[in-house]
Amino acid sequence: MTLLVYTENREGKFKKATFELLSYAQELAKNINTEIVALSIGDVSPDELNKLGNYGAKKVFSVKDEKLDLLDNKIYTAVIADILEKENAKIIIFPDNLSGRALAPRLSAKLKAGLVSGVVDIPSSYDPFIIKNKVFTGKAYASVKVTSDIKILTLSQNSFGIKDPSSDTPQIEDIKPDISCIDSNLKLLSVDMVTGKLLLTDAERVVSGGRGMRSPENWNLIEELAELLGAATACTRPVSDEGWRPHDEHVGQTGKIIAPELYIACGISGAIQHVGGISSSKVIVAINKDPDAPIFEVADYGILGDFKNVLPELTKAIKETKGS
């Protein structure tokens, strides 16, 4: 029996979340006396694949096929299920992000496996298997008992941390899956890659604005602070719907789920849909002139005041601290 970890890459480079998944898997594997097998789908170099061994993977399955370039969840699920069966893996771990939330339920239905999404800790018990996860958009936790033979977990970002890397080298096995019989209804018409700016899902720091910013012309205050902090910029759904900011900056339950080290919310009321997408952030700073704004309930630090007064002063103070 092994423990399987699904790893994500962007343009052949593994994301930070991948190393957190493997760090989490190390602790879990140690407790059940098993080994970690990692699955990589896409064109990833051997040097990059070797990094997975530094975080605990003993074996890495590298899957490359042009048909997989479509990112069709149906095909991905078939590939993952085949490797799961080949390795007799009883636990598989996904990131709790858009891809993990798309693949894990499909795999759960296909294998009749128990699924726990948004886990935040290693199991408190293995027989029976009981594990803690976030519920109600992070407002509470539940202890879930899984009774199925195969167990599927999605790990909430920034809930476990990343262990110091070792210099271990994994066994790498190239896999050519038989997916010729799987028909895809998807057609790739074009690819629009975000370039020239920090990706929201990878950013350690994020400065975000809501409708309380009042006008797109005021976004220069957010952009200046973000540039100073080396942060990405984000927004709420009403802001992107109004066309003030591009849709790829929308964070929340219906947008991108992020988990930065620092999230600064400017003029954001804190609707539950928005909080659900940023609740895994390590530190949340809220800037709002409404003392009753719900965002203050989830914030680690709150600044009561108008953004037009607060942001310039905050930017000035950071510049002085950095000596710039």
Image: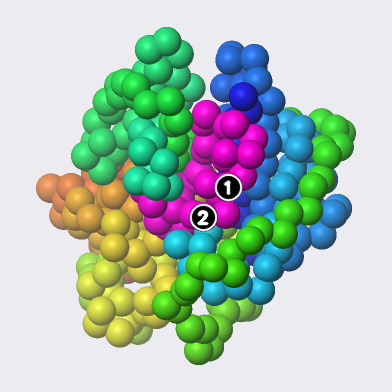
Image coords of residue 66 (percent x, y): 66, 74
Task: Sort mark 2 into few (<14), some (14-19) or many (20+) by Cα contacts within 10 Å.
Answer: some
Residue in the image at 41% along x and 70% along y: 249
Q: Foreground: 100 or 315?
A: 100
Q: Which residue is mark 1?
A: 82
Task: Sort mark 1 into few (<14), some (14-19) or many (20+) by Cα contacts within 10 Å.
Answer: few
Q: Quadrant of residue 250?
A: bottom left
Helix, strand or loop at label 2? It is helix
Image quadrant occupied by the C terminus: bottom right
> Magenta part of the protein: which range?
77-106
Image coords of residue 307 (percent x, y): 31, 64
Q: Is residue 269 above or below residue 3?
A: below
Image coords of residue 71 (percent x, y): 52, 68
Main secondary structure found in the magenta portion = helix
Amino acid type for the residue under numbered disc 1: Asp
Residue in the image at 41% along x and 41% along y: 111
Alpha-carbon span between mark 1 and mark 2? 6 Å
Image coords of residue 294 (percent x, y): 18, 47
Q: Residue furthest front?
A: 181
Q: Residue furthest bottom?
A: 189
Q: Which residue is mark 2?
A: 78
**Magenta stretch: includes residue 126:** no
Q: Is residue 210 above or below residue 49?
A: below
Q: Foreground: 112 or 261?
A: 112
Image quadrant occupied by the N terminus: top right
Q: Residue furthest left?
A: 292
Q: Foreground: 299 or 178?
A: 178
